[in-house]
Every structure is written in C-alpha cells, then in structure tokens.
Image: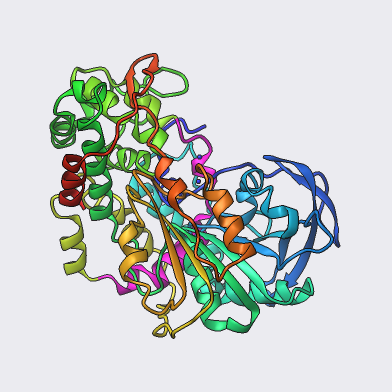
Amino acid sequence: MFGVKRPLNDIAIVCSLLFASVSVSQELSGAQDCYLDGWRHPLQCERIPVGEGDSKVELAVFVSPALDKAEREPLYLLAGGPGQAASDLVPLLNKFRKINQNHAIVMVDRRGTGLSRPFNCGIDRHTPMDLTLISRELEQCYLQQANFANSLSSRQAVEDLEAVRKHLNHNRISLWGGSWGTRTALLYQQWYPNSLKALVLDAVAPIDTKVFLSAAAAESALQILMRDCQFDPTCSEFGNWRKVLDDLLSQWSESMAIDFRDPLTGETMKYPMSRWVLQNTIRTALYSPEAAAQLPFAIQQAGLGNYNPLAGIAGLFPDSAVGMSLGLTLSIACAEELSRITDEEISADTSNTFVGNAFLEIFERGCEVWPVADRHYAKPQLRDHPVLLISGEADPITPPKYAEKQLGYLANKQHLIIASGGHINSMRGCVPRLIKEFLDSPEEELQKTCVNKIQRPPFMSGIYGPEIMPDITPTAENEELKEKVL
C-alpha cells in the first residue's frame, strides 16, 4: 500500500499500504456517480457532514453497489496508516469483483484524509530529509490547526463509521481492515458489536499491541528473506549479502551518499541520502515481496560500489510521500501509540536489528512538536463475531505472531498465513476467493490449502531482472531453518 525524487518521506511511506491517486469526476454533494483512479466502473458517492466547529468535516463516502439484487451485508474497507484514505484502496475492487457481486463495498475517507479535509502539513517529496527541518514544519502545522489535531482519534473514526452506516440504512455490516485499519475494525467490534456481522483483518494490529515497536519484526522479515535466498540457486550466488548490508550501514557517510543517484533522473541527489533514510528504504522494501526479491542483488551490487539497483528499489514507491495525511498520522500515533511505549521497550525492540531506531525516531521527533493528549484503550472484551485473519510470514511490521498470540478476545477466528508474504496479502493468489467464501459462509471452516501454492516472486539475478524460478519444494532442512528464524 505504492514519484519520489528521494526514496523516502518516511513518515508517509513506512505506514502505507496501497497507493492510488484520487480523481473525482465532479464535486461530491448528495448521492451521485463519480469515478476513482484504479477502478473503471462508476461509484455511488456523497458527502456526509460530521462534527462541529473546528472539527467539522464532510466525510467523502464511496459505494460500489452489489451487482445482484439479492445482496448480502455491505463490506466496508478500512485503510491503514493511520493517515491513508479509504479511497486509496479502490484498486482492491479489481480483486474483490466477485465479492462485489453480492456485497456492496463501501469506502469512507476518515476525517483528515483523502477528500475528507486532508490534514497533510505540506510535507512532500520535495521536503529535505532532515528530521530537524521536518520537525519545524510539523510544529507550524500543529500550531495552525491545533484544535483539529486534538479532535482526531480512533474513537472519532469509529463513531463516524457508525454514523455512515446509519445514514446509508445498512443493518449489520462486515469490515475489511488492512494494517492500521485492522485496529479500527477491532475497536468498532468492541464498541458496536450489534452493528457487525464479520471481520476480515489483513496484517493485524491488535488493540493492545504496540505495533510501532517494529524493528524486531523488520529484522525477522529480513532473516526470512535470507533463508529463502539461501535455498534459491540464483540468489545464493550473491554470497553473504547480509554482511554487506551491515557494513554498508555501519560505514555509510556523506561521501558515499553522493554516489547514490536519484532513481527517477539518474542525477546526483540534491540532498544526499542519510543513513536513517537508507535503513528505512530497506525496511520499506520488505513490505512488498516483489521489492524484497530485489534486495539481495541490489545490496551485493552496493557492496561493489554500484548503488543504482538500490536506488531503483527506492524508486519503486512513487507518490508515497503524498499518500498519507501526516497531521492525522501524528494525532493518532502520538496519542494512542507512542504515549504507551517505554524507553526499555524501545531498547529491547531495536537491539541487534538492521533498522535500529531509524523508524521510531521519526515519530518520536514528530510527537515532540505534536502535543496531543494521551488516549488509552480499555481492555478488550470477548467477542464472538466470525473473524478471518490474514498474515504474511515475512511482514516487517505486523508479523503472524500478533494474530496467533495476541487476540485472545476473539472467540471465533480463522487464520491464513502466506509463506514469505509481506504486508497485506488480500490480493495474492487464492486469497480473494477465500475472503469471498468466508463472507458468504462466515461460520464454516475454510479449505486453506490453496495458500500453500503462493510463492515468493523470483529473486532478481541481474540488471535485467529474475531468471525463471525453479520449483523449490519445501524440505525438512528448510523447515528447521524456518523455525530458527521465527
């Protein structure tokens, strides 16, 4: 969830899921047809006013009607971030076409995102990657809209979602949440259980899990990549590229950064790449199996002084800097996540990892100038709605263990784990079909064996891309190494 002249406006891209620019054919006011980039069919769209005073917003609501008259309950799509607009998820409709046959699909841009008064703070691809400068920009942004910043919360998002459900005259609904959207979905389940039929949670962020502590998860994802590379005849030829990465990060200097070219123009970058940016570039690549499959070759080449393949990976994430509403991101992250993380937890999470504190520091610095009040969640209560959990084995921020071990309050759940999968897997292989089967018959156990056929994309073997990947059957040795990694 992905052009940037520099690979990272990291506050934006590290939280992102799917990216799609929104182009609405006309102003939304009352139910009418409109179009979003990434989906060729008309949507039923309208604005719904919520809030008062400084927090007043007209929510942008997009509905893809069910094709069958005998439709089932609607499916609402909840975006991640926090800070991504639900309308950015419209490409999912292409994979959810069969679901849309008998389920209307609803997308609501939450307050501060998309077409619902976006709270962007002016940080974009042209902003120098200097944390001190970025902090100053964010401080001015907060001071200009302090009341709005303090009004934003997960509770508010859930209340708005419930208001939309009532406005659209929907009885019970089902929710699909991706990444941070799973947190919103779980909170909706806690607060409005009678409005809910079923949940599909992809890349699960449990209510009581501190998901911004993600350095260890990113390290685990990198080690799984190393495992898969070791047993791949092409990738294994790159040798100990992990040591090359460690040396690269430990020795990174401005003189080396000068040789790191702009991925779009091939010219010297106006602002040399900092070490923390490089760390987050590697981390972000792990979100996508397609990008991760390029890392071993790119890192091996970087060790030889050729940074172009690594710059190319950085260029895989165009528009990421404008894909998030950073004001909303900080209002939620600072109040609901950073406020409950201790220094001891940070030290334990970041120790012996390639990313260290490079990801979390962005938010720590941002929260210093974003003084929203702390908000705490109540202890989750037991719920028995049918829930389908989806995890990528190599997810660098929401690993499978979150769904396996930290959702004891869900009494009726099934779990799909995609081998070597990254962050968000609802579009891969047979998963869309399994989601449809679950929504159509949520109390029935799914036949999940088809997910075993989903493979990591072929590793890049050279500047022209991957070789044809042979079928590598899992072995006992593979599985033993897998257990050691996890």
Instruction: Let me know if residue 359 is in the magenta part.
Output: no
Instruction: Let me know if residue 321 is in the magenta part.
Output: yes
In the depicted view, which residue is nearer to us: 99 or 238?
A: 99
Q: Quadrant of residue 367?
A: bottom left
Residue 305, image x, y percentages: 21, 18
Q: Quadrant of residue 152?
A: bottom right
Query: Against 300, is 379 above or below?
Result: below
Residue shown at 81%/64% (left/top)? 70
Residue shown at 75%/71% (left/top)? 49
Our reading of the magenta stretch's main secondary structure is helix
Q: Is residue 416 left or right of residue 121?
A: left
Query: Against 16, is 469 above or below?
Result: above
Count the marks: how many? 0
Query: Against 2, is 204 above or below?
Result: below
The image's colour scheme reads rainbow
Range of magenta residues: 316-341
Residue 446, image x, y percentages: 50, 60
Query: Against 232, is 13 above or below?
Result: below
The reply to whether residue 193 is in sight is yes
The reply to whether residue 192 is in sight is no
Q: Is residue 237 left or right of residue 440?
A: left
In the depicted view, which residue is nearer to us: 283 or 400?
A: 400
Residue 417, image x, y percentages: 38, 53
Residue 31, image x, y percentages: 85, 60
Residue shown at 64%/63% (left/top)? 440
